[in-house]
Amino acid sequence: MSDGHAVGTDRVVVALDVGGTGMKCALVRPDGVAVHTERHSTDAARGPAAVVGTILDVAEGLAGKARADGLTPVALGIAVPGVVDEARGVAVWSANVGFRDVPLRDLAVARLGLPTALGHDVRAGGLAEARLGAGRGTGHVLFVAIGTGIAAAHVVDGTAAVGAHGAAGEIGHILVRPGGPRCGCGRPGCLEAVASASAIGRRYVELAGGTPAEPVTAAEVAERAAAGEPLAGRVWQEAVEALADGLASGQALFDVSTIVLGGGLAQAGHRLLDPLRTALHERMTFHREPRLVAAALGDEAGCLGAALLALDAAGVRDHQEKR
Ligand SMILES: [Zn+2]
């Protein structure tokens, strides 16, 4: 699998991570290093057809940029949010981007003529963290992204489980507080209704007697809690306890060696990790306690994961040799 020779060193893959507001794009070498990055606006309000048009234009532009720089683009990887049928290459459903059964892989192959992989944004991010980031060198990783929602990727030996319907990893909808706050999915008490970054901010404002017009971010709640404000401390601890319940369920199911926390909330660093480690420890009975670490790749993870999917589609896995 070694291609440290002239033939291999000029190969790159084109990678796109498509979000509701922006696209992170890169040309990535087989060793997982991005040699060129770009950001573009998604502008999802234009409708799914226009977004697909932009994705294909940007991908084609990146492939052209690679060739102009003397590089050979060998594959394309695209990560999108929502429900993704990776086997068929179809973006089945996405609230953020408005996709409904978009055959994105076939459209990209028709336009660029490159092997193309379509993946899910959080699973792609988890793949990158497991193979290149904070979970590197460990075979069993649970990546949990905590932002406006909570979603996970279970990665075993460098492959993220997709599920029978393309919807594996929805850890945010584990029931942790029966009768609790109503989740976006319609059920009360889901993990993300209690412990997502948006839920933490909302809960704080609610208990402080404020209105949603005066938003407080989860980061501010963490800061106020650290400064000793009792209400913030209570809200933060409630979220930590709920997260620990969710992660303990994840550990019971998957028995991983490492849990990697990503997304906006993970930027709270030790203010999140320290109490969460304690709360998770208290919940372990016979289960082996996983290592709990912060993500290492930041918001590049999804794009790097799309690149890894592309490398896999092209049959190139050089970075594995560095584990
Ligand atoms: Zn839910």
Image (cartoon, grey):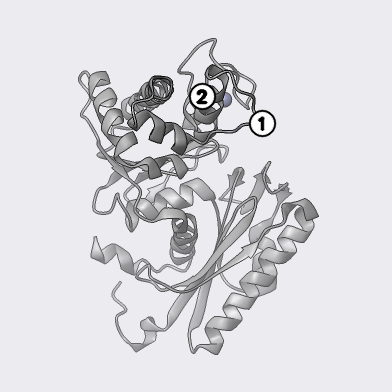
Local crowd size for mark 1, using a 10 Å CA cut-off: few (<14), some (14–19), many (≥20)? few
Residue lying farthest to the top in this orientation: 179
Q: Earlier in the sequence, mark 1 or mark 2?
A: 2
Q: Left of 306 or right of it: where is 126?
A: left
User: Where's residue 41, x and y in %?
Assistant: 66, 61
- Is the residue at mark 2 in contact range of ligand 1, meaning its CB lies under 8 Å from it? no
User: Where's residue 159, x and y in %?
Assistant: 39, 50
User: Where's residue 6, x and y in %?
Assistant: 35, 88
Position of the N terminus, as image quadrant, is: bottom left
Would residue 158 be seen by someone viewing this image from the given angle? no
Q: Which mark is residue 50?
A: none
Position of the C terminus, as image quadrant, is: bottom left
Specify the quadrant of the image occupied by residue 227: top left
In the rendered image, the vertical position of residue 85 relative to residue 108, given as above or below: above
User: Residue at point 46% right, 44% down?
Assistant: 264
Specify the quadrant of the image occupied by residue 321: bottom left
- The kind of secondary structure element at disc 2 is helix
Of 59 and 243, the residue lying toward us: 243
User: Residue at point 51% right, 11% down?
Assistant: 178
Instruction: Name the residue that disc number 1 marks.
Output: 213
Ligand 1 occupies quarter: top right
Q: Which mark is residue 204?
A: 2
Amino acid at the residue labelled 1 = Ala
